[in-house]
Image: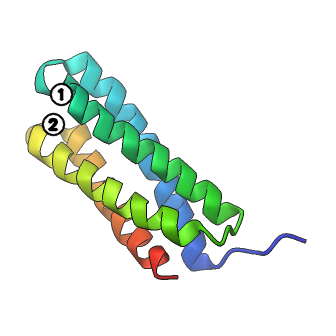
Amino acid sequence: MPHQVSSEIRSCIDNCLECHTKCTETINHCLKKGNEHSDPKHINILLDCAQICQTSADFMLRTSNLHPKTCDVCAQACKNCAEDCEKIGKDDDLMKECAKICWECAESCKKMAKH
């Protein structure tokens, strides 16, 4: 029988999945907006965040003993993404929301990295 995840891990999984979704939506939004929003560096930061969030959620769902490592990288990627979205999207509600969710996920994953 698979090991059940704690409520703290479940909360981090939910944060990661929400962040993955929001970053993926934001990529599409930024590509449509163009200019600095569609800069390859910014899009890659969003892609990094979306991908590591999905991976971290998967590792936690499987109760992998490597999940602290993926969560550590995830926290850094989310921090990078939040900072970039705040810088580029000062007047953009969707990007502000992306930054907010990324900060929440970064905090959650930072805790899980020490788990």
Amino acid type, callout 2 = Asp
Image position of 99 (left or right of 5): left
Q: Residue at x 69, y 74 (%)?
A: 5
Q: Residue furthest bottom?
A: 115
**115 is higher (above) or lower (below) than 77:** below
Position of the N terminus by quadrant: bottom right
Q: Compared to 105, does 23 lie above or below?
A: above
Image coords of residue 103 (percent x, y): 29, 61
- Sort mark 1 into few (<14), some (14-19) or many (20+) by Cα contacts within 10 Å: many
In the rendered image, is residue 51 in sight?
A: yes
Verify CB contact (< 8 Å) between mark 2 and mark 1: yes
Percent of width and height locating residue 32: 26, 17
Q: For the point 57% across and 67% down, which residue is it?
A: 67
Q: Which amino acid does label 1 sit on?
A: His
In the image, residue 24 above or below residue 104: above
Q: Residue at x 38, y 47 (%)?
A: 49
Q: In which quarter of the image is residue 29?
A: top left
Under tag 1, what secondary structure?
helix
Q: Which residue is labeled 2 in the image?
A: 92
The residue singled out by tag 1 in the image is 37
User: Which element type, helix, strand or loop, lies under badge 2?
Assistant: loop
Q: Distance between the residues labelled 2 and 1?
A: 10 Å
Name which of mark 2 and mark 1 comes first in the sequence: 1
Asked if residue 11 shows in the view, the reply is no
Q: Which residue is drawn at 50% across and 67% down?
A: 69
Among the 4 quarters of the image, the one containing residue 47:
top left
Is residue 14 left or right of 74 when viewed as pictured?
A: right
